């Protein structure tokens, strides 16, 4: 019984330091109320580096606080998201290729139009202009540096 109570007391600690994620449509609606820069993280379920990176970023409480307070965050699974997405006045759909596929928006956001490199990070300012782009792993330190730079714009 004591173990169970201890477990219940610790569970909220794991969820408190979590980056709040939104969808493209939700963020677009929120932007009408409060304009904030947007951070888009493109990943896939098969990308081990993506999972490790996301875990490491969420462990950094200062980073999570910065992200949740001053940015909108979209965690976008590029190869499993199948719904239509409206973003910056355009419509994007899932492109099926047999048992797999990729979302058009992932291709549009990527500089490599044939196959995005994962993880892929896209940082937009308050006016939705691209201010930083990174293919590959992003450390918590580098992420905090970029967030501070973008906040200063």
Image: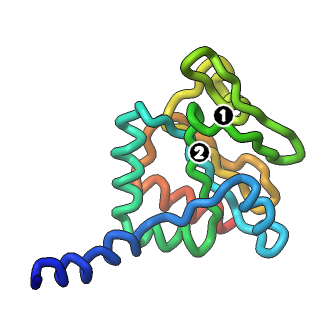
Q: Nearer the viewer, residue 141 or 82?
A: 82
Residue 76: numbered disc: 2
Q: Label 1 near label 2: C-beta < 8 Å? A: yes
Q: Is residue 8 above or below residue 103?
A: below
Q: Quadrant of residue 34 in the image? A: bottom right
Name the residue located 20 percent from the left edge and 76 percent from the top edge: 7
Name the residue located 73 percent from the left edge and 61 percent from the top edge: 26
Q: Position of residue 15 (x, y in %)?
A: 39, 70
Instruction: Name which of mark 2 and mark 1 comes first in the sequence.
Output: 2
Residue 152: numbered disc: none
Q: Quadrant of residue 97 in the image? A: top right
Element at label 2: strand
Q: Is residue 77 above or below residue 28?
A: above
Q: Is residue 100 above or below residue 44?
A: above
Q: Is residue 29 above or below residue 4?
A: above
- Badge 1 crowding class, 10 Å Cα cut-off, few under 14, some 14 to 19, many 20 or more, is many
Identity of the residue furthest to the right in this view: 89
Query: What is the spatial separation of the Cα atoms under label 2 and label 1, in whole angstroms?
Result: 8 Å
Q: Nearer the viewer, residue 102 or 113?
A: 102
Mark 1 lies on residue: 106
Element at label 1: helix
């Amino acid at each position: 019984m004591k173990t169970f109570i201890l477990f219940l007391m610790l569970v909220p600690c794991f969820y408190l330091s979590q980056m709040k994620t939104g969808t493209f449509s939700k963020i677009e609606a929120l932007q009408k109320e409060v304009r904030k820069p947007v951070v888009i993280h493109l990943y896939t379920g098969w990308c081990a580096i993506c999972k490790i990176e996301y875990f490491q970023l969420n462990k950094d409480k200062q980073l999570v606080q910065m992200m949740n307070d001053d940015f909108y965050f979209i965690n976008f699974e590029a190869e499993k998201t199948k719904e239509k997405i409206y973003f910056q006045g355009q419509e994007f759909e899932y492109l099926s290729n047999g048992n797999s596929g990729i979302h058009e928006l992932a291709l549009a956001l990527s500089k490599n139009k044939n196959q995005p490199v994962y993880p892929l990070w896209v940082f937009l300012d308050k006016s939705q202009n691209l201010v930083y782009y990174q293919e590959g792993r992003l450390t918590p330190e580098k992420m905090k540096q970029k967030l501070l730079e973008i906040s200063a714009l």
